[in-house]
Image: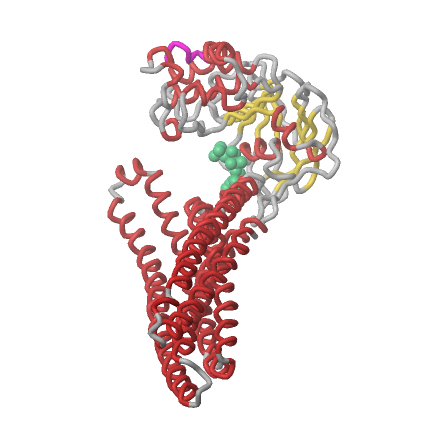
Amino acid sequence: MIGAVLAIVAAVCEVLSIALFGYITDEVLSNQDLGAFWTPAVLWLGLTVVAGAVSFAGSYATAVGGERFLLRLRGRVFEHLQTLTPDFFDNRRLGDLMARLTDDIEAIEELVGSGLVKLFTTVASVVFFAGAAFYIRWDLALVTFTLIPAFLLVSKVFAARFRTAAARERSSNGSMNSVIEESLSNQSLVQAYNRQRTEAERLHAEGRTWLRANLAQAWLASLYGPVVQVIETVCLLVILGVGAWEIVSGRLTIGGLLAFAAYLAYLYPAVQSLGQIALTVSEAAAGSDRVIEVLRTRPAVTDREAPARPAARSRGRIEFQAVDFTYPRRHRPTLRNLSFVAEPGELVVCTGPSGAGKSTIAKLLLRFYDPSVGRILLDGVDIRELPRESLRDDVTILQQENLLFSGTVRDNIAYGRPDASMDDIVRAAVLADVHDFIGTLPHGYDTPVGQRGRLMSGGQRQRLAIARAILRDAPVLVLDEPMTGLDALTAARIMEPLNRLMAGRTTILITHDLRFIPETARQIVLEPVRRRTSRVRIRSAGRRDAVTRPV
Ligand SMILES: Nc1ncnc2c1ncn2[C@@H]1O[C@H](COP(=O)(O)OP(=O)(O)OP(=O)(O)O)[C@@H](O)[C@H]1O
């Protein structure tokens, strides 16, 4: 609003300056009276200074509004993305989502930042310059204004095509980002398999689509200027012709005609830039369509309106009651009729062939998905009744692939409890058997772990993740293949800190590797769901031939 008001003031100053120019032409130049020059000259200079100051303040005020709006928009889209279940990300390309958060939001920025200032200034200019032209000679103004629809028609035709080209450019920009993101994040695989050339070709192919879309935009933008210029020249000739006739008839002075022409010289570019704003709007619209698509996606799992109030600290009793689950867009169920109980502090080992649905149990427990049938209970309460935040505070997961962020060792251990003291962090590292190793790092706890922790070995990453889980101190623990990728010696070494982590916590240990599992641990064996006969067997790890029973 401040920007709009200031833009109007600036336009009024410019209108008055041109009126002074007309006055000087008639009173000073035509009458050859130098004495009449000084007052309008000083006034003109004053108006120019005021117009400059006001338009500076207006542009800046509007830019502040636009940029702040964008800061909030980007934050809002990002927050919304984090409410969506991991399934959403599994089904999208990361590079494309990143393009939506950066380039597409930037396209909107161009509209609400510089675009908005321009729109205010232009509309104010059009209104005032048109008004001033009418004031000088309404009939001449009417004749010249009949040509304005030609400008608007041209910009309408161009804007529609520009929007299609911009949408293509936005989407191919997303695809290009995806290729770059995928290739660069998998560089060791790319190089080990000699796929550099193929990856470069993939990027080139996406780049060509992007190039075509950009050239279509450039073609339209370059054509727009000359087409408008032709219309402008027609207008100018009409003004000169009709103006000359008005002067001959004595209804207009030369100063009046010059001022009139000057108003139109401001007015037509303003109308033309209204058309260009239409192009900016088209581009922003293409970007905002993609941003809105993300904002419109509803999370697959949400909290109840009035969720149950969870106990201050959960005891950690987990119960799956006749759970069936089918992944979205899949026809075959992954789990069918799965029932088991894990008592507080108990270790339950979950095994079964690859693809039987072991990791799916962890995803259901964290409510990344809800069961299609059946219930999952935490301390006797259906987890759908609990706020997701408190449920996830009670469950710590140690994933198959240990996910570290690119911060320091300390940041990574404290990830689940950012307020933890240094003493707590060190204690967790000691229990996870990683403290001595950290001592050998160049900057100890302040050593960066590298992108996704790649500066650490698999075993070191695993022990850092164990320290992180120990520090989090949740009553329920899900360990998803904690020994994956580790050799026998490292796996044996991991077991000790893992046992310390599991002590006193309800633990669901998903693993293929039964070598280090305590004899007494209860074991759930998942069988892949085939026809309707799939089932779950429960047996003791020590007695593999024990009676198996469908649950
Ligand atoms: N997000 C998903 N969308 C669709 N299907 C999925 C998804 N995640 C897993 N699946 C499918 O569900 C089945 C079970 O997967 P899950 O990861 O739970 O198996 P798993 O028993 O842990 O296997 P592994 O031991 O190999 O890790 C598999 O057939 C898999 O293809």
Vertical arrangement, residue 106 with respect to residue 247, above or below: above
Give percent across and percent down for residue 78.
52, 41
Q: Position of residue 186 (x, y in %)?
A: 34, 38
Q: Is residue 77 magenta?
A: no
Q: Residue 443 appears in which quarter of the rendering?
A: top left
Q: In the shown orientation, is residue 216 left or right of residue 371? A: left
* Residue 356 appears in the figure: no
Q: Nearer the viewer, residue 551 or 464?
A: 464
Residue 119 lies, with reference to residue 346, above or below; the image says below
Assign the C terminus to one quadrant of the image: top right
* x and y, in percent, of residue 340 in the image: 66, 27
Residue 247 visible, this angle: yes
375 or 169, which is in the foreground? Answer: 169
Residue at x 39% of width, y 18% of height: 446
Q: Looking at the picture, does residue 226 appear above or below residue 77?
A: below
Q: What residue appears at the point 57 percent right and 52 percent down from the top-left corner?
A: 1
Residue at left 47%, top 15%? 495
Provide the residue span drawn in magenta.
431-437
Q: Quadrant of residue 387?
A: top right
